[in-house]
Image: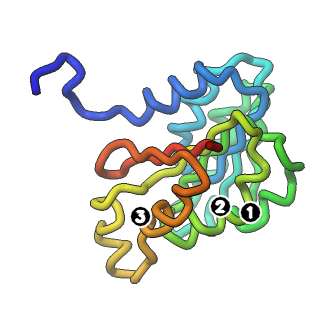
């Protein structure tokens, strides 16, 4: 069908739009890499928004020497805190219902999604939103997921779709939005 809306998905625009529309007080990001999504959160939120960004930096294969660059890049933003943090422990730092937007992009696979559902969803406010990289069928079948025999994301989304509103946008890498029903 012809439409002016037919074009490639810009995942940065999705992150920016969700941030703008939700006017968050607290954003938590797990996985910084080079800071693309973090910069979108900063530009689309107010200076009163507290943003906590975590990464394992040089402990992640292929992410060596990035920490100093990231720290310098985001130093001017007083509302942004960048810390070393392992996704499997970060949730312990937050009381229930304290996060407006949670973003997880840490080489996601089915196990990461399942862990998020079991440990993070209660940390997000009732009207909050969770953004996660991945979720499409093609993303489940990319080379590294197959090579390392990583569990697929789609079965986990199917399982939890009875409890949460879940929408996956795009093909590769895709982004999955999760909200309370």
Answer with left or right where residue 166 lies relative to residue 75.
left
What label does residue 180 carry, if any? none
Closest to the observer, 148 or 130: 130
What label does residue 119 carry, if any? 1
Query: How many numbered badges does the structure rendering display?
Result: 3
Residue 43 visible in the displayed image: no
Residue matched to label 2: 116
Q: Is residue 177 above or below residue 122?
A: above
Q: Contact (CB < 8 A) between labels 1 and 2?
A: yes
Position of residue 124 measured from the top left corner of the image (x, y, whole percent): 74, 44
Residue shown at the point (55%, 28%) measured from the top left:
18
Residue matched to label 3: 154
How far apart are the two marked residues, 1 and 3, measured between alpha carbons?
Answer: 19 Å
Q: Is residue 104 above or below residue 3?
A: below
Q: How is the image coloured?
A: rainbow
Position of residue 57 measured from the top left corner of the image (x, y, whole percent): 63, 59
Position of residue 71 measured from the top left corner of the image (x, y, whole percent): 69, 41
SS at badge 3: helix
Task: Quarter of the image for the C terminus: give it.
Answer: top right
């Amino acid at each position: 069908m012809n439409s002016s809306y037919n074009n490639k998905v810009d995942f940065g625009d999705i992150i920016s739009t969700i941030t703008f529309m939700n006017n968050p007080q607290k954003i938590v990001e797990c996985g910084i890499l080079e800071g693309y999504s973090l910069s979108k959160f900063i530009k689309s939120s107010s200076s009163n928004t507290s943003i906590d960004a975590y990464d394992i930096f040089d402990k992640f294969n292929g992410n060596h020497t990035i920490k100093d660059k990231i720290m310098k890049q985001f130093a001017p933003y007083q509302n942004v805190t960048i810390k070393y943090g392992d996704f499997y422990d970060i949730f312990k730092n937050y009381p229930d219902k304290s996060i407006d937007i949670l973003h997880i992009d840490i080489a996601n696979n089915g196990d990461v999604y399942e862990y998020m559902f079991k440990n993070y969803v209660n940390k997000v406010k009732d009207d909050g939103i969770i953004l996660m990289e991945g979720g499409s069928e093609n993303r489940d079948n990319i080379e590294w997921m197959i090579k390392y025999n990583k569990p697929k994301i789609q079965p986990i989304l199917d399982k939890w779709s009875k409890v949460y509103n879940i929408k996956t946008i795009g093909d590769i890498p895709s982004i999955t939005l999760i909200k309370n029903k």
